[in-house]
Amino acid sequence: QVQLVESGGGLVQAGGSLRLSCAASGSIFSINAMGWFRQSPGKQRELVATITRGGTTRYADSVKGRFTISRDNAKNMVYLVYLQMNSLKPEDTAVYYCKLDRVGVSSPYWGQGTQVTVSS
């Protein structure tokens, strides 16, 4: 089993910054990719940013140049992925979810989500 715990969400004014963290523990071997997704009320969950085990990153067009995904290799059996969010806009308001894909495992793992609210 894999456990994903997100942290770092909160309330920030437009133009501000937040850094989200996702701590992955448990069966975290053979990680294929990790990423951040977000969902706001009435909308589908959407990709924000992903990072593969090889370090390749991918961003939604709406966050390019403002958000940066990064990772720390496993230490003490915990693997960390971060999302640095700068120049935040009210439209970035959503629940942000961490996702982990393992090689050979069809279903991804999801965290419980962390709320990000950007006030105008």
Image (cartoon, rainbow, N blue to C red):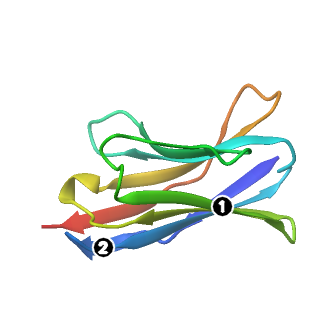
The quadrant of the rendering that contains the C terminus is bottom left
Q: Nearer the viewer, residue 42 or 38?
A: 38
Residue at 85% of width from left, 42% of height from top? 30
**Residue 108 in picture, x, y percent from top left:** 67, 35
In this view, 50 is above or below 76: above
Q: Amino acid at mark 2?
A: Leu
Which residue bears the numbered disc 1?
71
Mark 1–mark 2 contact, CB under 8 Å? no
- Residue pictured at 53% horizontal, 57% vertical: 69
Disc number lying in front (1 or 2): 1
Could you tell me the amino acid type at mark 1?
Arg
Foreground of the two, 24 or 55: 55
Q: Element under label 1?
A: strand
- Residue 25, image quadrant: bottom right
> For mark 2, does the 10 Å Cα neighbourhood hold few (<14), some (14 to 19), or many (20 or more) residues?
some
Q: Quadrant of residue 48?
A: top left
Mark 1 or 2 closer to N-term? 2
User: What is the number of the mark on residue 11?
Assistant: 2
Q: Compared to 10, does 93 lie above or below?
A: above
Q: CA distance from mark 1 to mark 2?
A: 24 Å
Could you say where residue 68 lies in the image, as x and y percent from the top left? 47, 59
Label 1 Cα crowd, 10 Å radius (few <14 / some 14-19 / many 20+): some
Q: Residue at x 29, y 35 (%)?
A: 43
- Residue for point 59% across, 60% down: 70
Q: Position of residue 110 (x, y in %)?
A: 61, 45
Q: Which dot marks residue 35?
A: none
